[in-house]
Image (tube, helix red, strand yellow):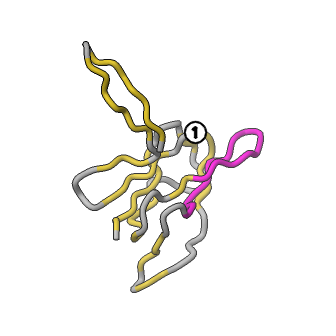
């Protein structure tokens, strides 16, 4: 996560740039940093009928027209709640593509 300062009036505000939105509820929304074609990755681990993911694990990739791929990785360890798109669907930068229930 990178940190930047944004000036609001006479004050400097710390602005954090992240690929996931943080909330007070125990979920992490995963955001794609680029636009392209969504490719959902197969699950790596299950427990109790749920897909579990580790922090840093890619749950999908976004494929660009030149065939380069950008991973969409979980920023937390937990249970994959849902992928918010279909395999092959076009996504735009900043679009939510999955959510993870934090462990």
Q: Viewer-proximal residue, 103 or 68?
A: 103
Question: In this view, which residue lies farthest toward the right?
Answer: 66
Asked if the magenta segment contains residue 68, the reply would be yes
- Residue under label 1: 34
Question: In this view, which residue lies farthest toward the left?
Answer: 24
Image coordinates for residue 30, horizontal then vertical, percent: 44, 52
Q: Viewer-proximal residue, 66 or 87?
A: 66
Q: Viewer-proximal residue, 29 or 39?
A: 29
Examine the rendered structure and indicate whether residue 8 appears above or below residue 5. above
User: In percent of the image, x 44 and y 54: which residue is there?
Assistant: 84
Q: Is residue 58 left or right of residue 82?
A: right
Question: In this view, which residue lies farthest toward the top?
Answer: 9
Q: Secondary structure at mark 1?
A: loop
- The local crowd at label 1, few if under 14, some if 14 to 19, many if 20 or more residues have their Cα within 10 Å, is some
Q: Which residues are magenta?
A: 57-71
User: In percent of the image, x 57 and y 60: which residue is there?
Assistant: 58
Question: What is the chief secondary structure element of the magenta stretch?
Answer: strand
User: In percent of the image, x 34 and y 65: which residue is there?
Assistant: 101
User: In percent of the image, x 62 and y 41: which residue is there?
Assistant: 36
Q: Viewer-proximal residue, 100 or 67?
A: 100
Image coordinates for residue 6, horizontal then vertical, percent: 37, 23
Examine the rendered structure and indicate whether residue 51 appears above or below residue 76. below
């Amino acid at each position: 996560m990178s940190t930047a300062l944004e000036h609001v009036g006479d004050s400097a505000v710390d602005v954090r740039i992240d690929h996931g939105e943080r909330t007070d509820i125990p979920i992490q929304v995963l955001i794609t940093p680029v636009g392209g074609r969504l490719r959902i990755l197969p699950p790596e681990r299950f427990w109790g009928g749920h897909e579990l993911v580790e922090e840093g694990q890619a749950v999908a990739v976004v494929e660009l027209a030149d065939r380069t791929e950008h991973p969409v990785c979980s920023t937390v360890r937990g249970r994959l709640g849902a992928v918010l798109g279909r395999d092959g669907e076009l996504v735009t930068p900043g679009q939510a593509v999955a959510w993870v229930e934090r462990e």
